[in-house]
Structure formats: C-alpha cells, structure tokens
Image: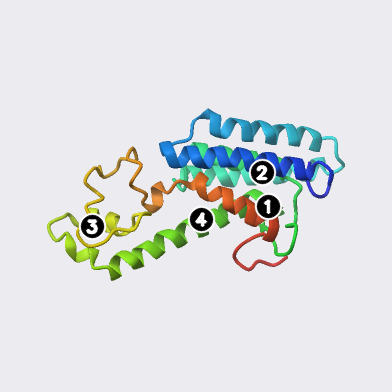
Amino acid sequence: MCLNQCPQAFPFLTILEMLLLCHAAFQDLEKRELNASAWLPILLLGLSAFTFELASNTLLEAFFKLVQTISLLGLLLLLGLYGPGDALILVGICLTHVSTTMPLLHGGLLRVFYPDFSLTVLLNAEILSSTIVASNLVHNLRSGAWGSYPSEPFKKRIIRMLLLRAVGNGESSLKELDIGSTGKGIVFVKKTVPLAFFILPSYLATLLFGSLLPLPA
C-alpha cells in the first residue's frame, strides 16, 4: 500500500488518488466548497490502504506517525489554515501514504518525528497557492489598480489587490464581494484560496520530488 510495503499496488493507488483529487479540485473551483463526494472517496481509499498496512511489521511506527500527523492537521484546522473538507482530504492522503518515506525521483519529505508525505503535500500546496497570490499582488500594484478605487475602504482595496484573479485599471471585479463571505466564486483571497485545487499538483510534486523547499533527505 506504499512504496516500502507493496510496490506492485503503489501505481494503482496513486492513479486512483490522482483521479479522486481531480474531482475534488474541480468541485472546489466550481462550488468554492467541498461536499462529501469530494473528500469521502479519498478518505475511504486511505482507510482501505491503511487496513492492509496494519498487517505489516511496522504497525507501531505507522500508528504513532498517523497520530502525529492527524494531530498536526487538526491543529492547523483549528487555526483556520484550511477548511474541514481540505483537512479530510489530507487525512486520506496520510492514510494512503503513511509508510511512504521518500519521493519516487529525488528530494526529501517534511520531517517532524518521521518523514511525512501528507504534511509535505500541504506545504507544497501552500507554496503553490501563495506564489500565485503573490504574483497577482505584484501585477495589480504595477497596473495601478490600487489608485483606481480611492473611495473604497482600505480593507476592501487590500482584498482586491490579493485576488487570485488579477485585476487592472477600472476593472470592478469586486462588485459582488461581501467582506467576510466566501460564497462568491470570483473572489479568492489567500484565506479562501481553493486549496483542494492546489493539493492536486502538490500531490504529484510530492510523489515525484518531495518538498518544493530544499529539505534534508
């Protein structure tokens, strides 16, 4: 069920995981929320993989690693880094890859007590999402969009600059924005970035290369 325990099953698990993550990513982009059809299949896949993992000789290590990772994911959920649907997707990835200790090609996984695949996926997803938001911030500031809305409240202008979709002079893409509401699909500020969309490429990057930041192997 992982690179170390059952290499012949690993390609099937990863392809199925990728397909399920594709569904979750498109749902997050379209609806700006994740229902059970997005995270439940990933969670069930992880539980199935972990059931086979229990028969291995690394039961105690896998158990402590699982407790450690889920505790950290739960803490980050309480801190508001992502939503419950994103957290459940990451738990499913953790269960599927609880014994994956290295990427397929090169690089390293994030370590707390053990090398952890799912926490590396989360780190990579945050890096990818932050890069896009930062690039649009630079674009919007250079375009002069900040000075195009002098009568808007300061908080609203900050949000406009951080939109995932770049804005330009005179473009009123915040007409429907309700500050504090995430119901409008056109508004993607860092806190409301569709994280499931970034988990998809992050999963592939982690699978192949590990962390996008240089980490000890």
Within 10 Å of the Cα at label 1, are there few (<14), some (14-19), or many (20+) other Cα atoms? many
Q: Amino acid at mark 4?
A: Glu
Residue that mark 4 sits on: 126
Within 10 Å of the Cα at label 3, are there few (<14), some (14-19), or many (20+) other Cα atoms? some
Residue that mark 3 sits on: 157
Of the numbered discs 3 and 2, the one sitting upstream in the chain is: 2
**What residue appears at the point 78 percent right and 44 percent down from the top-left corner?**
10
Which quadrant of the rendered structure holds the N terminus? Answer: top right
Tell me the SS state at disc 3: helix
Task: Say above or below: 80 vs 143.
Answer: above
Residue that mark 1 sits on: 116
Which quadrant of the rendered structure holds the C terminus? Answer: bottom right
| Contact between labelled residues 3 and 1, with CB atoms less than 8 Å apart | no
Within 10 Å of the Cα at label 4, are there few (<14), some (14-19), or many (20+) other Cα atoms? some
The numbered mark at residue 94 is 2
| Contact between labelled residues 2 and 1, with CB atoms less than 8 Å apart | yes
Marks 2 and 4 sit apart, C-alpha to C-alpha, by 17 Å
Q: Quadrant of residue 186?
A: top left
Of the numbered discs 4 and 3, the one sitting upstream in the chain is: 4
Marks 4 and 3 sit apart, C-alpha to C-alpha, by 23 Å
